[in-house]
Image (cartoon, helix red, strand yellow):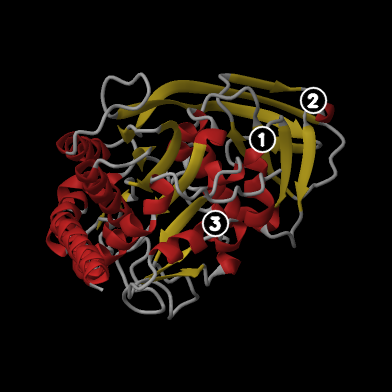
Amino acid sequence: MKKILLLVCTGFISLFSFAQKIDKIINAKEVERIEKILSADDMQGRKTFTPGIDKAADFIASEFAKSNLQFFGNNTNYFQVISMVKAKPLSVWGMLGNDTLNMNNVAANTTDAEININSLSDYEVVSIKADDNFSKTVFPLFEQEKNMIILVDTAHSRRFKSMQRFTGNAKFKSSVSQIFILTPNLNPTSLTLHIKNELSEQTLKNVVGVIPGKSKKNEYVVFGGHYDHLGIGKPDKNMDSIYNGANDDAAGTTAVIMLAKYFSKLNDNERTLIFVAFTAEEIGGFGSRYFSQQLNPDSVIAMFNIEMIGTESKWGTNSAYITGYEKSDMGKILQANLSGSKFHFEPDPYPKQNLFYRSDNATLAELGVPAHTISTSKMEEPPNNEPNYHKQSDEIETLDMKNMAEIIKAIAISSKSIISGKDTPSRIEKRK
């Protein structure tokens, strides 16, 4: 009996010591310190290709350095530099049947300096009809690795203008082009089109740090969140012009920084841990897409993508949801590791929003990795949605620091059996 009591007391003391250790590293005060810096006005909304996002990257790298993280791969610092190409149209002219083509009705998603089309048979032709859902029909076409002419009915004129701005963004160098033409004629008999672009190179950077594993160095567990946001807009009548992005996603980036510090102090991971602050999520997920290309997906055991955890979930405090919960058993593993805890993970309650493929977990998930987003953000229809989502009012004062700390602690504790090599989540079916 004395031996049993001794074992129970030893286990209790160990658990109490563990709780003290994690609370010392992950707590509301530390959450607030990091959040204040990342969402401060001098970060200028952390928009890509601005001094503000570079300042944020430098801060994240300095935090990784404090945690003694190693560099990723052959990098000589914490920055994973990504080369992008921006194509600015200098001239657009041609004819679609009897209709004149120009910069007003043509949008080219391309990285080519010059495009010359003399026949409809040169490219695959796709039509977007007046009653088609524009977003659901058009945006999947950007993923197609083939030259395409997309004829867009003039009923979509307003959305077409927005898409013109999107196609003008910098992108990965590619050998294929998608040419969008706004026209009432979806059955033309002829096409000639000539586009001349001015090309310029722009760079982005992820911030990446590593804690090598002990016995399973070639098996990776990734913790990520995006650090970019929307930048500066027009002043709101009640707010300034800066989109501070405290919840979206300085909150997730704060979690990544704190988890890196915690696991570095613990120093008992059997699998290699990779901590990454992704860039360019808001303009197409280029940071996570590039990062995914640098890894063999078969070696990535799991990915925790942390997105907007600064507010209470629909279940209140001490809870969060996992996107794509049903696609692997990772969620069940995490919840089992929280047995006896007041914290609980839930399946994504917003399946209509397709959140699983809308964040930085998507690229690895498409390759079969159990890569899931953890979030508390309410993505319902107004008035039950997040009131500050993509607004200037997304500031630190709207966040719950104590609850954020509990969520980060729950991620740390729930991931332990995966990090130790005890549990390996089932793979996700690869997306075709």
Residue 320, picture quadrant: bottom left
Image coordinates for residue 275, horizontal then vertical, percent: 33, 40
Image coordinates for residue 345, horizontal then vertical, percent: 43, 68
Tag 3: amino acid: Phe
Quickly name the residue at label 1. 179
Tag 1: amino acid: Ile
Q: Secondary structure at mark 2?
A: helix
Quickly name the residue at label 3. 356
Image coordinates for residue 95, horizontal then vertical, percent: 74, 32
Q: Label 1 to label 2, Cα distance in Å?
A: 12 Å
As drawn, the residue found furthest toward the right would be: 189
Mark 1 or mark 2: whose residue is earlier in sequence: 2
The answer, for residue 284, to whether it is visible in the render is no
The answer, for residue 330, to whether it is visible in the render is yes
Query: Residue at coordinates 28% horizontally, 60% vertically from top-left?
Result: 409
Residue 338, picture quadrant: bottom left
CB within 8 Å, label 2 to label 3: no
